[in-house]
Every structure is written in structure tokens, then in C-alpha cells.
Amino acid sequence: MKESVQRFLVTKVLALPAKVLGHSDISLTPSDQTGERKHSQNGTGNETDSVTWNFLSFQRQLANLLFELGCTSSALQIFEELEMWEDAVICYERAGQHGKAEEILRRELEKKETPALYCLLGDVLKDHQYYDKAWELSRHRSARAQRSKGLLHLRNREFRECVECFERSVQINPMQLGVWFSLGCAYIALEGYEGAAKAFQRCVTLEPDNAEAWNNLSTAYIRLKQKIKAFRTLQEALKCNYEHWQIWENYLLTSTDVGEFSEAIKAYHRLMDLREKYKDTQVLAILVRAVVDGLADRAGEVSSGLKGKLQELLGRVTSRVTNDGAIWRLYAQLYGNGENDSGEDIEKSLQYLTKAHKCEIQSSDWEKDVSSFKEVVKGAIEIAHVAIKCSKNKSNRQEALQILSSARLNLRGLSSKAKQLFIDVASNEVHSEIADEVTAMDNMIAELQELSNQLRDQC
């Protein structure tokens, strides 16, 4: 870009959504247990044994399916019949029967201590000592123990300890999507953006359609000042999820920041599709400035060519957000603020400046604050100047008179109000801090009156 239109960019981190982490990252689901313990199969080739094994396998799969469907009681019954106590514990946990789950675990631990049982006991009691016991018992080979310990630290917002545990877990088993995602979020909380970028890169490698991971990767890139990479990763995020308004908002901010103004306009439209009264005045101000001043976009193209698209966008915005004076002023600015030679543009500028002025005087307490009052006066005088230009373009003298009369009455009301609110009782004069504005209004009122008289003489 030839001229910077940088904005302090803060993208939203989409942290720890349930559909990414999943139940298995908080406590093991029954299906996860198969990787934590061995099931015996005698392998004699006996047909009866084979049938029995197939039946047990079917029962186990049925129980897992019932659990996933939320039929916890039915799944629990099958697990207990099969004496699959670790899976039964998870069912009791889901049902909120923590005491029963602890009872079964302690009973099974008396028979044989295993890392998986200690991890489950840690899940039930939310106690680090049982994960540590599982870690030692596994001879530092249990990814599950470090994962669960890390999640407990994460719940307690102990991010540094959380990162240490997750790093150990993924070193043992690098295929844990949820752990990589949680690790990335923990790194962002610690402002360790290089670590966050690495973690979210692994997420999108394991699951290329993970929109949240792509979004959070872009956040890490933003913090690392790699904004073009952030822009591209957000494009990948939107391919995965076209309906997520927060990703679209991040895309809007990043597009604006890197000078992809056409994409920013597209993103703003999409946000209005998703959130009816969405507005970001700062982004609109940057886009209007880019178009009006003819700034170059990221590709080096002059942005003036986007004027029609931006007018369409502001038309849509103002049709939904009707009470924001700043947006109406931007709309007027896009039409030249009455300073160009197009009669149509001058008329539209007058229309939008008038709407902006009405929004400003409808806000509370502007009359009591001198600086706010002066801003309103400044806007009214600007309207009067544009009204004069607009009246000169009118072939119908009555329309021209009406435009001048409206501007004059507006200024007269403000002048009277100023003389009432900001009068020095002792000298019976207007306070010096607003005297110049009052004089300017009175002079403009006289000029408008003179122009109106001239038009009447011509009738």
C-alpha cells in the first residue's frame, strides 16, 4: 500500500469449542478405552471362541454407540454385564454419580493398579496426584495422564503448567487434535505466539476443515506481525465454515488492515447477512478514506474504482442502522460532502449531512457540554454551505427557497439556544469560549436570508 491505513487489529480467538475438544479430551469415552488396555483373545482358532469373541465385540460396539447417542443407562448396563468397569465409570460420571464411579475405581485399583484407572480417578476427583501416579506407573509413557493433567490446569487457568503437560502429551502421541488445539489456546493466553502458531498448524494438518483452528492460527500470525499469512489462513477458515460471524469479522479486520479493500466490502456484506444490525464505524471510515483519497490496495490498484460498491454497502448499512450520525457523515463524505460539481452528489451530501445532524441533536447532554455543542454548530454551518450550493442547482425556485429556509431555521434555533445556555449573567453576553461559533451562525443566517430574498425578488 502507498499510504498506511493501519488499524490496531485484534482478532477474536475461538477458544476451546466443545465440537473441537470433544468429550474424549475431558475424560475418556468408552471407545477411547480400547487404546488404554488390552482385551484378551486366545487365538486358538476354535470356532466357538471366535463366535464368542465376535459377540462380545458386537456388544462392546453397541454399548459405545448407545453412549454416543446419549443412552447412558443402556450403555452402562451392557458395560457392567461385560465387566468393562473403566467404561462403566465413564457412564456413571456422565450420569453425575461420582460416588459410584469412585467406588468402582478404588475397587478395581485394589485388584490391579493401571495408569488408565488412576487417570479416571483423577477425572472423578479433579486431583493432580492421581495423574502423577498414572504418569509414574506408566514409566512416563502415558499421553493420557499428561493430557488430563493439562486440562485440569487449563480449567484452573494455570496456563504455564498446562503448556508443559500438553507438550509432554503430544510428544508421546502427536495425533491428539484436541490437545494441540488446547495447547494453542494456552500459548495465546501466555502470549507465546510462535508456540500457538505451531500448535494450530498441527491442528489443521490433522483436520484440514477445522475452521476454529484456522481462525486461531491467523490470530497467532497477526501477533507475529505476519498479516498476509493471517489473511490467507482466514480464507481457509471461511472455506470450512461460511456461517461463523466471528471468523467473518476477523476476516473483515484483517482484509482492511492489509489493504484488501474489495474483500473487506464483501466481508461486511456477509456480516450483515449473519447479523442484521452489524456495524463497524472504524472500518467504514478506513474504506471511505481509501476510496475518496484514491489509496492503493495491496495489489497496487487505486481504490477509487470501489466507489460504487462502497456506496451500495453504505446504503445497506444506513437502511438498518439509521441512528448513527458518524455513518451518515461517512456516506456524505463518499459523495464529496457537497464539494464536487455533480448536482446529484451535492443533493445526496446535503441529505446525509442533515440526517447525521439530526442523529447528533437527538443524543443526550450535547447541549450541556460546550465542546459537544460546538461540534453540532460546526455540522449545522457545514449543512448551510452545502444547502447554498444545492439551492443554486435547483431550477425550481420554491425548492431552492425551502432548502435555504430549512438551513436558516436550524441555525437560528441553535443560535438562540447558545444565547440561552451560555450567557454571562453579569455582562449579559455569550461566553467567550463559544462566542466565535455564535457569530459565525449569525453571519450565516444573514447570508441565507439575503439569498432567500434574492430568490423571492426573482419570482
Image (cartoon, grey):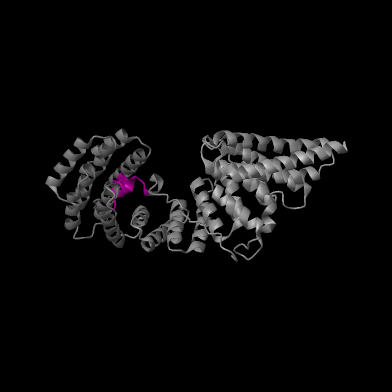
| Residue closest to the far front | 427
Q: Quadrant of the C terminus?
A: top right
Q: Position of residue 135 (x, y in %)?
A: 20, 56
| Residue 244 visible (yes or no) | no
Camera-side residue: 141 or 428?
A: 428
Of 443 and 41, which appears nearest the observer?
443
Q: Nearer the viewer, residue 120 or 361?
A: 361
User: Looking at the image, can residue 286 be seen?
Assistant: yes
Magenta span contains residue 30: yes
Measuring from the top left, give residue 455's x and y in whole percent: 83, 39
Residue 320 is left or right of residue 81, and the answer is right
The residue sitting at the right extreme is 459
Report the residue at 16% width, 38% height from top: 103
Please give the name of the residue rendered at 20% of the width and 36% of the height, measured from the top-left corner.
Answer: 100
- The residue nearer to you, when weighing 351 against 290, is 351
The residue lying at 44 percent from left, 56 percent from top is 219
* Side of 141 where 363 appears, left or right: right
Could you tell me which quadrant the N terminus lies in?
bottom right
Tell me: 95 left or right of 457. Answer: left
Locate residue 248, reporting x and y percent.
53, 49
| Residue 89 position within the rendered picture, expressed as x and y whole percent measured from the top left | 24, 41
Residue 391 magenta-drawn? Answer: no
* 198 to 316, vertically: above or below: below
Which residue is rendered at x = 53% and y = 41% of the image?
370
Specify start and end residues of the magenta stretch as a single range: 21-36
Q: Residue furthest left?
A: 110
Taking 167 as reference, is 304 left or right?
A: right
Q: Quadrant of residue 421?
A: top right
On screen, residue 91 above or below 15:
above
Q: How many marks?
A: 0
Which picture quadrant has residue 86? top left
